Image (cartoon, coloured by chain):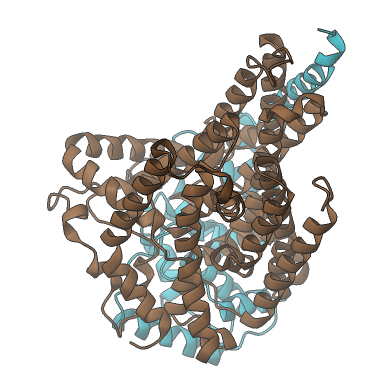
Chain colours: A cyan, B brown
């Protein structure tokens, strides 16, 4: 058999080796990630948090109350502010993420007119993962529309949102809504 | 008609696209359902944070959330329609692949019939207006399966095998980016491709040999690997674990190997139709009942998602080992749930999701319900004699392996949606039954007996699921 017939195999093997080399070089080391956790660049910091929260068996203590407060209450960057509401952080909470619950449902913070509140509500309450991580119901179309309005930092239709959420709460009470599972 | 002409196939394919486009326009604005909302959420979160977030219970492959993210960041609310339109167009790949496969298995006329069945197969067509990953997944999987068969087929001796195998590998990997279910099918196919080289393509043609077999298997496997490896490195960087693309086995073990019976053709009715008896309550309890209080919980204490999912698999397997009788009974039920003539289209009708569309009312509703039930019934009944009509042993072996693989995966969690990969292969067989039946010696017991046994088994499985099927159909019909 002609060796030329093996050229495509060799080429694919070469690409694969290059990918492996590039992949290994691009791996973020634990020390890099720890360094970025306190970075001034919000993008770098939020990415570091994502890696720190997921890699290996992460340290639960790191994601305590003061960490979440610093992110949500003392940051200008939207991604950092909303990060405590993601699975990355909520999976460390037992039995449920109480501080995040307080921020989206507590009377002091609940503000349907605020775009940031609405985004935090969606990220927290509509997430994939179930009640264990704070999720309640699945995202609806009208909520998606409000998400985009919030992204444009427009004033939110607070009364409509309030009515919508009140309606959902009644639905939940009336129906056999349990933990909505992925299919 | 020339057997190698593509024109008639393209015409049928265009008809299939028109049907799907018509359905899309007819259904209008549909509320997000179940996993549709989950996919949209993952896309929103990806757009906001700039990375694919952890989804906790699953590690879904990134393909579908990525497509949604791309469109949502560009078109906002318009993205939902745009993605559905893309799905309509992408379904051309499914239709063409089914027809090309049928042409190889039988002939050009049968391929056209297969194309017409694909056009009209409502349970599959309806997925083009759902935001589930199925259509894009099949748009990659169907041509991959066709290309692999085209290499296995003895007629492939003179064809550009290398290019076909590279394309098949790339398409299979692309399919895995949407759903990782065929991950373990890929090495089996590579093995088949390799082993086929040990056989003579024809009596007067020598076998390509073991070295050529190795080359072909390597081409297919490496083509897949070059697409899979980048996301595997991403997963390793994020989780510190080697996970090729995705991992949903852990959650599926929780659902499929546990005390509580779940079937997502039925479960949403309990949640969203409080006005009626839940169809899941109609199920024959003898097959699904596990020892009370024997259920297990997810390994929530493990924070690393791949580790948690692995632990869930271990717990599921331990549960199965502890309850062998239940395992056997419940797998019979899973098989019944797989072949039951339900569909997500019927589920949508039953849950009144089409009420804002003409499809949800009057004669159109009634006709669509009848048609949605008839499609899988007819397809399954016809596929069995279609299998008997296959002339090539390689074709029989190939279809047995692929169908067997998807049957085996569905024994864990079964519902009509998981039957759809089989539909890609059952359509050619059904067309074969319609067009080739006259050439089959039905009076030979070796031919007739397996078909009759298959029909009898189907009958038993349909009887098992009859109570809940009837309940869903009644709700879809709209009389309750």
Does residue B369 sit above or below B99 in this rendering? Answer: below
Nearer to the camera, B159 or B309: B159
Nearer to the camera, B42 or B328: B328
> Image check: A144 left or right of A165?
right
Image coordinates of residue A77 in percent, x first then y, are 67, 61
In the image, what residue occupies the spot 21% across and 49% down?
B295
Nearer to the camera, A120 or B263: B263
Does residue B463 sit above or below B361 in this rendering? Answer: above
Instruction: For residue A183, say whether it is visible.
Output: no
Image coordinates of residue B107 in percent, x first then y, are 70, 46
In the image, what residue occupies the spot 31% across and 75% down?
B471
Does residue A136 sit above or below B224 in this rendering? Answer: below
Image coordinates of residue B297 in percent, x first then y, are 27, 48
| Quadrant holding the C terminus of chain B | bottom left
Image coordinates of residue B369 in percent, x first then y, are 47, 77
Nearer to the camera, B322 or A79: B322
């Amino acid at each position: 058999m002609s060796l030329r017939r093996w050229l495509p195999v060799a080429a694919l093997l070469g690409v694969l080796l290059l990918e492996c080399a590039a992949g290994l070089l691009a791996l973020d080391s634990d020390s890099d990630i720890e360094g970025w956790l306190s970075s001034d660049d919000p993008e770098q910091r939020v990415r570091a948090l994502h890696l720190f929260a997921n890699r290996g068996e992460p340290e639960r203590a790191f994601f305590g109350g003061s960490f979440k407060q610093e992110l949500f209450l003392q940051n200008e960057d939207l991604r950092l502010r909303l990060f405590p509401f993601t699975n990355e952080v909520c999976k460390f909470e037992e039995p449920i993420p109480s501080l995040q619950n307080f921020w989206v449902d507590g009377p002091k913070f609940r503000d349907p007119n605020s775009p940031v509140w609405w985004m935090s509500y969606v990220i927290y309450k509509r997430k994939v993962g179930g009640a264990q991580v704070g999720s309640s119901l699945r995202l609806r179309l009208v909520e998606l529309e409000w998400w985009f309005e919030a992204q444009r930092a427009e004033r939110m239709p607070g009364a409509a949102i309030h009515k919508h959420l009140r309606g959902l709460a009644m639905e939940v009470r009336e129906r056999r809504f349990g933990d909505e599972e992925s299919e | 008609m020339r057997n190698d002409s593509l024109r008639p196939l393209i015409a049928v394919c265009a008809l299939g696209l028109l049907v799907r486009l018509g359905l899309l326009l007819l259904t209008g604005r549909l509320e997000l359902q179940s996993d549709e909302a989950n996919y949209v959420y993952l896309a929103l979160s990806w757009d906001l944070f700039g990375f694919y977030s952890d989804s906790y219970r699953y590690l879904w492959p990134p393909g579908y959330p990525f497509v949604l993210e791309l469109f949502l960041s560009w078109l906002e609310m318009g993205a939902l329609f745009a993605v559905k339109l893309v799905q309509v167009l992408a379904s051309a790949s499914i239709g063409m692949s089914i027809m090309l496969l049928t042409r190889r298995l039988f002939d050009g006329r049968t391929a056209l019939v297969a194309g017409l069945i694909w056009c009209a197969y409502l349970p599959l067509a309806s997925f083009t207006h759902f935001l589930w990953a199925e259509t894009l997944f099949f748009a990659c999987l169907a041509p991959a399966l066709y290309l692999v068969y085209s290499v296995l087929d003895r007629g492939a001796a003179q064809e550009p095998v290398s290019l076909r195998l590279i394309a098949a590998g790339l398409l299979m990997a692309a399919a895995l980016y949407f759903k990782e279910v065929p991950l373990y099918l890929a090495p089996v196919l590579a093995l088949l491709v390799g082993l086929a080289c040990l056989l003579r393509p024809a009596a007067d043609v020598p076998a390509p040999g073991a070295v050529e077999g190795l080359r072909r298997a390597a081409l297919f496997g490496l083509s897949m690997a070059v697409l899979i490896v980048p996301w595997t490195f991403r997963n390793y960087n994020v989780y510190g674990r080697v996970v090729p693309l995705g991992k949903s086995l852990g959650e599926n073990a929780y659902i499929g190997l546990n005390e509580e019976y779940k079937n997502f053709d039925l479960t949403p009715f309990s949640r969203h139709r409080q006005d009626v008896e839940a169809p899941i309550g109609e199920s024959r309890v003898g097959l699904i009942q596990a020892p009370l209080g024997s259920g297990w919980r997810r390994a929530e204490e493990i924070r690393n998602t791949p580790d948690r999912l692995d632990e869930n698999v271990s717990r599921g397997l331990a549960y199965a080992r502890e309850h062998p009788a239940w395992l056997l009974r419940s797998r019979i039920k899973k098989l019944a749930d797989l072949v039951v003539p339900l569909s997500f289209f019927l589920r949508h009708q039953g849950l009144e999701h089409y009420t804002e569309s003409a499809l949800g009312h009057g004669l159109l509703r009634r006709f669509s319900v009848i048609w949605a039930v008839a499609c899988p019934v007819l397809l399954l009944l016809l596929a069995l004699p279609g299998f008997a009509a296959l002339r090539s042993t390689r074709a029989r072996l190939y279809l047995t392996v692929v169908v067997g693989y998807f049957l085996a995966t569905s024994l864990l969690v079964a519902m009509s949606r998981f039957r759809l990969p089989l539909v890609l292969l059952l359509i050619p067989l059904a067309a074969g039954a319609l067009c080739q039946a006259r050439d089959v010696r039905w009076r030979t017991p070796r031919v007739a007996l397996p078909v009759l046994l298959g029909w009898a088994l189907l009958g038993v499985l349909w009887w098992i699921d009859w109570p809940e099927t009837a309940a869903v159909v009644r709700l879809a019909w709209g009389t309750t």
